[in-house]
Image (cartoon, helix red, strand yellow):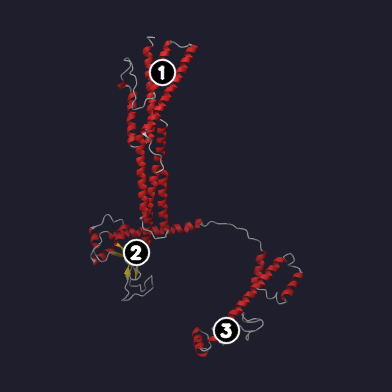
Amino acid sequence: MSGNPFDSDEEPSAASDEILEGFLCPICRADLKSIDFLTEHFARQHAEEEDALKSVFKDIFTKAKKKILNNFEDDHDRGASSAASAPAASTSNAGAAGGARGGSNGSSKTSNARTRNNVYNNMSKQTVGAERSYNEYFQSVRNPRLERYASETNKLIIRLHRLLKDLPTDAVQRKQHEQQTVPWLDGSSVKLCPNCAKSFHIARRQHHCRLCGGIMCNDCSRFLPLENAMQLASLSTTRSEPLQQMQHHEDRAIRLCQHCLWLLDTRQDMHESRTCRPLLTQVYEEIRQLQKQVTPDLEMYLKIVNSLYEGESIFTIADAGALRGKIGQVAETIDLRSKRILTIHSEPGSREEALKKAIRLSCVQVIKERMLSLPPLPDEAHIRKIQERKRMETEQRILTEQRMAMEAYERYGSTTQAGGSGMENRSFAQGSDLQSLNNWSAPQASTTTKSSVDDPLIEQINNVKGYIKQARQDMNFEVVETLELNLRDLQREFYERQRHSSQNATSPHS
């Protein structure tokens, strides 16, 4: 068997019985024991044999490629034959066929890779085993770490608050104040920087973190500006006089270690993510709020216009005009907000730029389809004709009902003359129901009834009219509609009372 795996069977290696290892020369195959000796040997002995070296490596790669391809073809053929003759794999005929194809040495050269390939082909698909959730374990590891970071960060903020409170401007007094606030570690026994592991000497001095008291070199030191420190310590609104003087001093930062600065930056980023929102988000939320507020107004405007065209007197043309003006102002505001979004800076071709254009297009589409497509205000003369026609139709309907009642009276004759006079009073009361609220008038009651000023029903009607006027000023037309219907009910009740009073007054004369 050849010792070199890249040697072919036709050209056996000269040292076929020996496997060479070490720092071998590719030309003379001498073991030089180290890379330095090998480099020196090749430079002295084979400096002019670069072409021979290239041919040696080319020959090695060619043999390796040929060997790999042969092994792959053998594995493929064996896998196909084992799959085709699976029922007869254990018979003697299969052994004879294998011997005829590959010879007696074919079975002895079966590698571990081929054996594994045959095993994998005959294996069935493995079923899914038991599952286990590691969520509890993850939380048990994560929560203590977060609590430790949170408690450590809180301690740093408390120390930062004490450090910035009444901070002296003099360098010596400031150093004493920092050492009294946070004790510093003794650097006499510290020879190396804990971060970079460089030794301390005259050129590389020791420095202390102002929040934990740890030791570090100047290259590993980090500096926190006073403005950021005051924000973290919640001292931005109540700055003391020494602190204001420090801003004009050259040393306007606090020396910290990397770990302390990382904790403070993490807390600052968390606070900003919860409280600060991008300008694009703020303007977009304003647009969404305006669209939400204008949706009921759009529906109410359509309802008012339809009510006017149907001849109803609950709403007026002035109500529709005021509501349409309000909708126009909201549309103008949405247009300005969407234009403001386009002015926000963003990188060209970024997703933020595409988002701004999409918001602008959506706003334009909403304004065009929902606000500018509203039906125009109806003509006042046309509305008056519609209301007059409806009033005449209603009066005609009432007269028809009265005629039918009179025919029934004459046919059956079951009522008295007093009943006829009562019918006339009834018709008068029904006709008064058609009068509008602003032009409302009722026949005066007899002198035996109490004064209208003391009547609680009239007082309630006046109160409802005042509420209707106030609701129209606030353009709350849903309330206007409800109050108008309530006022009609009160008006109808007052008519019924007047009718009964008239019947009682004329009954003795009949």
Q: Up-down: is 79 above or below 154? A: below
Residue 168 point in image, percent of width and height: 24, 62
**Quadrant location of the C terminus?**
top left
The answer to whether one can see residue 277 in this image is no
Q: Is residue 403 left or right of residue 335?
A: right
Q: Up-down: is 297 above or below 498? A: below
Helix, strand or loop at label 1? It is: helix
Observer-side mark, 2 or 1, equals: 1
Q: Which residue is labeled 2 in the image?
A: 212
Tag 3: amino acid: Val
Whether tag 3 and tag 2 are in contact, CB under 8 A, the answer is: no
The residue at 22%/58% (across/down) is 241
Q: Which residue is labeled 1 in the image?
A: 426
Disc 2 packing (10 Å; few <14; some 14–19; many ≥20) = some
Tag 1: amino acid: Arg
Which of the pair 40/476 is nearer the observer? 476
Helix, strand or loop at label 3? It is: helix
Corner quadrant of residue 304: top left
User: Which of the marked residues, 2 or 1, is nearer the chain's N terminus?
Assistant: 2
Q: Residue furthest bottom?
A: 45
Cα separation, mark 3 vs mark 2, equals 64 Å
